[in-house]
Image: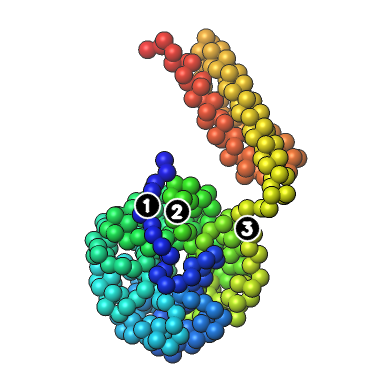
Amino acid sequence: MIINLNITGSLISGVDCNKPLIMAGPCSAETEEQVMAAARELAGIGVKIFRAGIWKPRTRPNAFEGVGSAGLPWLRRVKEETGMRVAIEVANVKHVYEALKNNIDVLWIGARTSANPFAVQEIADSLRGVDITVLVKNPVNPDVELWIGALERINAAGITHLGAIHRGFSDYGKSAYRNNPQWQIPIELRRRIPNLPIIVDPSHIAGKRDLIMDLCQTAMDLDFDGLIIESHCDPDNAWSDAAQQIVPQHLEYIIKNLILRSQDVDNKKSVTLEELRVQIDKLDDEVLRLMEQRMAVAEKIGQFKKENNVTILQSSRWDELLKQRINIGLSKGLSADFIQKVYTAIHEESIQHQKAIMNKNSK
Ligand code: PEP
Ligand code: MN
């Protein structure tokens, strides 16, 4: 179901928010000098929105938890001296009041907070009647409904300059990323709320700086609206998230080298695109027709098992089938992971069909 949020005007009042909107700044505000140095350099490369964490939600205690309200006047100075708008994270009502008192332009709700409807509702209530931009990061867990719920709560409080930030999802175990991008989730968010700007946070997805450029390009290729990137003049000595921060010159290089593709193509080329889409539609019809036939056979197997009193699942057959399909898939240039996912879904559907047959007319 498509959701219509009340989203009006530019994401940030008075700022040209054309794609790609770039927000950048250090993970944390550490000292006034560090904030001002980053701000000057970032303003110099054309960044319009400066980010800095004032209160830091750390996974473990005893890490740097932010300078707190003492850093807010530094951000006022950033505004005055560079003309950039400033953005900070808020996690509770006190943070909101402090931010409003200090003329902060953009508030973002962090991933740990957006996972908690009580906290989000409290923030929403404290923002009633305030004209400010709010960006909602995805919750740490891959739950698009929870993300949508947080956006709805903020929007229902009257915030119409509203956007989402995709920062990836926690996962257990080793991965190339700090937070798994699971692009299908922000894509689903876009499908559900088509008028919602979505900004990608490659820094927190990557966790290390050499993956950032590639993630920025993917974000653009998937047609997201902007990027929020952690940038620090001396990243290796940053007080938080050192491995993922980049110097402003590195950011400038990334921005200059982003390839921006348009969503539409000119008429002459779009004929070809149309033709390719027709081909895709035809192939999908074929895939679905084959699935229908496959399920019909599964039902016959169900009937056979029922008559012969055999269990639905014979795990050795399933193991063997999956192995063999993965090998065939690999020979056709399809990844093992893809085949595994597709066949797990097909197998589950087959079991449902078999179950329906086996339980028909039986008590
Ligand atoms: C941050 O932006 O510095 C931050 C703490 O991000 P997240 O809430 O995505 O972990
Ligand atoms: Mn950070």
Q: In the image, is residue 5 above or below residue 237? A: above
Q: Secondary structure at mark 2?
A: loop
Mark 2 or 1 closer to N-term?
A: 1
Q: Which residue is under mark 3?
A: 262
Find the residue positioned furthest to the right: 331
Residue 179 visible to the viewer: no
Q: Residues within 10 Å of mark 2 (few under 14, many from 20)?
A: some
Q: In the image, is residue 125 above or below residue 39? A: above
Identify residue type, mark 2.
Asn
Q: Residue at x 46, y 19 (%)?
A: 356
On-image quarter of the N terminus: top left
Quarter, ligand 1: bottom left
| Marking on residue 195 | 2
Q: Residue 330 lies in what quarter of the image?
A: top right
Q: Residues within 10 Å of mark 1 (few under 14, many from 20)?
A: some
Q: Residue 331 lies in what quarter of the image?
A: top right
Dots 2 and 1: beta carbons under 8 Å?
Answer: yes
Residue 249, percent from left and from top: 60, 81
Residue 127, percent from left and from top: 27, 65
- Rounded to the nearest angstrom, the CA distance separating label 2 from label 1 is 8 Å
Q: How many marks?
A: 3
Identify residue type, mark 3.
Ser
Q: Secondary structure at mark 3?
A: loop
Q: Secondary structure at mark 1?
A: loop
Residue 79 visible to the viewer: yes
Dots 2 and 3: beta carbons under 8 Å?
Answer: no
| Marking on residue 5 | 1
Residue 5, percent from left and from top: 37, 52
Residue 244 lies left or right of residue 268; in this view the side is: left
Q: Residue at x 51, y 25 (%)?
A: 351
Q: Residue at x 68, y 53 (%)?
A: 266
